[in-house]
Image: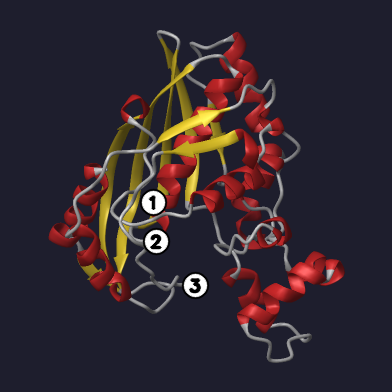
Amino acid sequence: MRQYLNFLEHILNNGNKKADRTNVGIISTFGYQMRFNLNEGFPLLTTKKVHFKSVVHELLWFIKGDTNIKYLVDNNVRIWNEWPYRDYQNSADYQGENLDEFVEKIKNDDEFAKKYGNLGPVYGKQWRDFNGYDQLQYVIDEIKNNSQSRRLIVNSWNPPQIKDMALPPCHMMFQFYVCDNKLSLQMYQRSADAFLGVPFNIASYALLLALVAKVCNLEPYEFVHTVGDAHIYLNHLDQVKTQMSREPKKLPKLILSDKARIEDFTLADIELIDYNPHPTIKGKVAV
């Protein structure tokens, strides 16, 4: 994962300080690309520990078309909690609960979760029901039946619905490519939180590539990550420097069960072996 450290270095060396929506402040550059060959191992960051189960559950949540954090909360995935909590704080029902208390209500009260756990028409909705159209299934069918198509695209950026989303899509479009029985995927990310978000994004789309390749009987090959606004939040600078001081380790391996449909995968069907990263480095998410 030297590619990722080079990405951080590029932002630090070429970026400009800017104000941002969260008022935290960022160092930002525009336009960058990384490439990860899955034959060299699964691209899960080794210079800090990344919680792989959270990556898996979030991706399975997208694939299900789900947009409520209840599934994530029930599986101890915390990465989306801040956005619905922010909206709850602005509601008439807010009674001063902290984030942990809010999450417990989501976990234990189905009616509360239904009302306050929904994120609006975010990724899963757009992948599986873009104005009534199942983009993901269409692309899988095309890969199987018309693999040379240049239209193997899933788009999460649905302009009329952006205002209804808790967070507009950051990783907003991806495209598949088939050659010599190998499947590759390129994702375009309009906005990339380099320290917290990008390690998850790399692992998530590499996993998506592997799952689609499995159900299409192809070899997963290359994940290409193309970034628009690449930024490091000012409150993550110390964490980034710590991470850049660490030497990358050997990448882990991914083992998948055989499945006929992408919806059939569960956590038990996705195994990561030989993952031996450096310790976790914590950072606060900017909302």
Q: Quadrant of the N terminus?
A: top left
Of residues 44 and 196, the one nearer the viewer is 44
From the viewer's perspective, is the residue at label 2 or at label 3 nearer? 2
> Does residue 158 show up?
no
Q: Secondary structure at mark 2?
A: loop
Closer-to-camera residue (161/53): 53
Between discs 1 and 3, the one toward the N terminus = 1
The image quarter containing residue 127 is top right
Dot 3, crowdedness within 10 Å: few (<14), some or many (≥20)? few
Identify the residue at horizontal 61%, vertical 68% (top origin). 81
Q: Residue at x 48, y 39 (%)?
A: 272
Q: In front: 285, or 125?
A: 285
User: Residue 184: x and y, percent?
Assistant: 42, 24
Identity of the amino acid at label 1? Answer: Pro
How far is mark 1 from mark 3, CA to CA? 18 Å
Please, what secondary structure does the residue beneath circle 3 have?
loop
Query: Which percent across, then down, holds residue 128?
Result: 69, 38
Q: Which residue is mark 2?
A: 196
User: Left or right of 107: which side holds 13?
Assistant: left
Q: For the view shown, which residue lies furthest in the right direction?
A: 111
In the visual, does 220 lie left or right of 75?
left
Give the class, few, some or many, for how many residues have Cα within 10 Å of label 2's Cα (few <14, many ≥20): many
> In the rendered image, is residue 224 in sight?
yes
The amino acid type of the residue labelled 3 equals: Val
Instruction: Give the mark, 2 or 3, whose residue is nearer the N terminus.
Output: 2
**Residue corresponding to mark 3:** 287
